[in-house]
Image: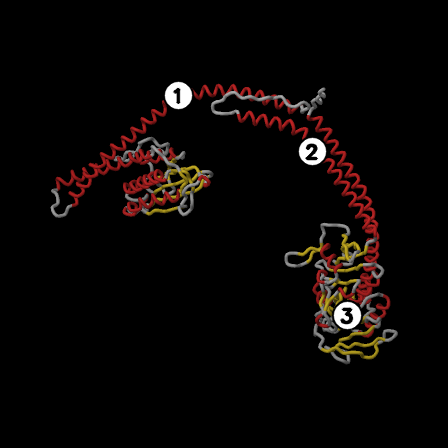
Amino acid sequence: MKLPSPPSQRLRDRIIWATSLQLLLVSSAVGGMAYFSGQRSGLSFTDALRQQDAITDLSEQLSSRLQAPQLINNLNVLAIRQGQLSLTDFEAMGQRFWSQMQLFPVGYINFGNPAGEFIGVERLENGAFVLNEDAIASPLGKGTLGVYALGAKGERGALLETVPGMTTAHEEAWYVETVKAGKASWSSIYQWEDKPAVLAISYNQPLYGPNRQLLGVIGVDFVLSQLNTWLAEVWKDVRGFALIVEPDGMVVASSRPAFTSIGTGDATRRVRIDQLPDPLVQAASRNLFRQGRNGSLQPRTEQTGPHTTDQDGHTFLLDLNPWGQREGLNWLLITANQSDQAVQASQRFALIALLLSLAAVAAAVVVTIRVGDWLLGPLEVLRRRCGEAATQVTPTTADLVFDPKLPAGSAIEIEAVSQAFGALVERLTQARRQLAEAMERERLKDAQTVLVLQDKLKSSLQAAAVAHEINLPLSTLLLNSKLLLEQGDAPLAQPLQEPLRAIAANADAVVATIEKMRSLLRNVQTHHQLLNLAHVTRNALLYAAPSLKAAGVTVQRQGLDQSWAVMGDAAQIQIAVVNLLRNALEALESAGGGVDGAPATVVVGLRRNADTVVLTVADNGPGFQAPETDLEPLATSKPTGSGLGLFVVQTTMENHHGQVVVGRSPLGGAAVQLIFPVADRSSGGPTH
């Protein structure tokens, strides 16, 4: 018993349910992935919040410390303006600086004037305070810095150290940059003149008297080593590090003090973040900075949020935050904080989500394959039957056999296509029968045409033979007449010379006419091959060069040193170009030179115009006498001309599917353009 075939369904219905099933599978995968990703994001967000809390606390404490220099400067400037602090009383100024350092966590408070005098109170690493002074009234004199101990109430104590060779004018950044800025500002990071191993940054303010006269600069230093110590204390309970860097990656301060500089004494220099050997710092440099073309570093601003990196089996969160804009600084705060096991759990969740997604995609692929088989099965049957019908097409067979019926259950739309193709094959069979009948009628006509062409070719060959037979006696007649005219031993009488000259001239004209007729006969059969039009043109110029040179004609060449590929008969094209050069020469000789007495000139050029190559022969002779219209066969304006020259050119261009355009040249004379189609070099053949 044969099972019933499944009913035919519309292609639209099959596509809808198959696509819906695939969307259901993919949406399930996406939903699962979103759920597990949400779990992962929640865990990661918890860690990120914990790190952000630590960063926020660090940022606020750092801002509090860096507000102290601004506050101290404002208090001192106010005291100077109110007369409470004299710029010449270094003793009172030193005690005031000492009392302020008892209240604020700064490393140095100082003042310098244009005379090079200087006073400052310094906080040492051990917490003690010393007074540094270089003044004219000092017992040590100007140019030697004295370092004094300070008592319990800030009074000057014993001289601890002298530093000779101080500069006449202050050249450190705290003084020079502030004077240049003309306003309160932060200096760049610099080394102390008396202690090159000390790196510091200072907030300074210029002091002016009447008429904007500079009285000096007062400032407060932040010693980076002390900032390192404070940063290490704040970050001591965090597994990782905290770095303050400039936008170019140069380190300002670090919770690991060894990371800020290298070298000792005068050789002390700052380091860039990518120069630090620590693997975790190197990972932060790669993730948070990019390297510019000149080797400089630039912070990555296209990504937000913390990055993760694994070091020694632990996961760290790396983050970069701008800091200091409110305080007038442009610094970056970089932190590395060890994450807990939540990140590892989130990674496991991400892997599960990925596996579920891959499984859903695999199921969708299986459904797609089944749908593809249902769609492509009938199409394959249709393709095979079309191929069988194609093999039946022969020159002698007009009837084609095609079965439009497809297997049961095929899509209705595909069945409609098969039926339409069956109708097309039937109509094609009818058309082939009609075409065969029409071709038979045309074959009979073509046979008659071939006979006519054979007769024309036979006539052309006979004419060529006649031309050859005529050319022999004429050449003999021309030679003998010229010999009689040119003999020097016994010159002919004057009455005989004039008829002989006429005979020679007429014979010469007949020979030229025969040569042109032979050129026309040469054009009956054309052998096309790939050739370089520039090479053919140069050969034509070489042939005509003696005549042009004898007549004093200057030849200008344009574009003949390049390669211009066309399909053609080299002999025919060369004859056509020689005819154009001969016409130009005759025109220049008849006019006695170029227009307006200019030297006789002929320009031969090649150029590209869209998909054609244009060969131009132009002169500065009298030009065409008739209007510049289409060439008339065998028409000429010369009294003794036959018009064969331009007719040869015209027939040549017809044989080459080209065009002849006549007109006036920029030199004032005639211009003839031969326009050839550009050839495809893949056609093969000589192109030299």
Q: Quadrant of residue 377?
A: top right
Label 2 Cα neighbours within 10 Å, binned few <14 / some 14-19 / many ≥20: few
Residue 342 is situated, as x and y percent measured from the top left of the image, at 83, 50
The CA span between labels 2 and 1 is 58 Å
Asked if residue 204 shows in the view, the reply is: no
Q: Which residue is mark 2?
A: 369
Q: Is residue 302 above or below residue 612?
A: below
Q: Please identify the residue farthest to the bottom as the structure is shown.
A: 139
Q: Which mark is first along the chain, 1 or 2?
A: 2
Task: Give residue 241's mark.
Answer: none
**CA distance for labels 3 and 2:** 84 Å
Which is more toward the observer, 323 or 103? Answer: 323
> Circle 1 — which element?
helix
Q: Are marks 3 and 2 in contact (CB under 8 Å)?
A: no
Amino acid tagged 3: Phe
The residue furthest right is 152
Give coordinates of residue 333: x percent, y percent.
Answer: 77, 57
Q: Quadrant of residue 3?
A: top right
- Identify the residue under disc 3: 111
Q: Amino acid at mark 1?
A: Leu
Q: Amino acid at mark 2?
A: Ile
Give the mark toward the camera: 2 or 1: 2
